[in-house]
Image (tube, rainbow, N blue to C red):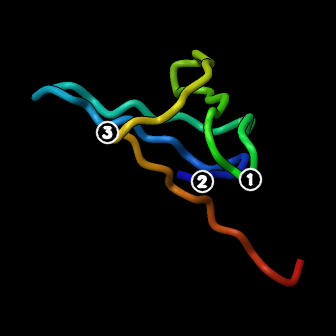
Amino acid sequence: MRARVGDQLVQHGRVVGQQDKVGEIVEVMGQEGNPPFRVRFEDGHEGVCSPGPDTEIRHRETTTGQ
């Protein structure tokens, strides 16, 4: 699971009714885009995550030529 600063980390709820937890990756602490990641979540909480199987990375759009 590779990521870049600015990508979104989404931790999916594990039980019925539990909301997904979404955050922005603010630091990639592993080598070559690998975990762990420092993540700032929507509620302002910041923490270090090593994502598990219930997590996905949503890559931010990049523009070329600028």
Q: Quadrant of residue 24?
A: top right
The single residue placed furthest to the right in the displayed view is: 66
Q: Residues within 10 Å of mark 1 (few under 14, many from 20)?
A: few
- Residue occupying image coordinates x 79% and y 80%: 64
Q: How far is mark 2 from mark 1, CA to CA?
A: 8 Å
The reply to whether discs 2 and 1 touch (Cβ–Cβ < 8 Å) is yes
| Image coords of residue 26 (percent x, y) | 72, 35
Image point 62% across, 18% down: which residue? 46
Q: Is residue 10 above or below residue 65?
A: above
**Mark 3 packing: few (<14 Cα in 10 Å), some, or many (20+)?**
few
Question: Which residue is farthest front?
Answer: 31
Q: Which mark is residue 2?
A: 2
Identify the residue at horizontal 57%, vertical 59% (top origin): 59
Q: Which residue is mark 1?
A: 32
Helix, strand or loop for disc 3: loop
Using the numbered discs, state the Cα–Cα distance from disc 2 to disc 3 in whole angstroms: 15 Å
Q: Residue 24, relative to residue 57: is it above or below? A: above
Q: Position of residue 4 (x, y in %)?
A: 70, 51
To which residue does mark 3 refer?
Answer: 54
- Of label 2 and label 3, which has the lower sequence position? 2
Q: Is residue 24 left or right of residue 56?
A: right
Q: Earlier in the sequence, mark 2 or mark 1?
A: 2
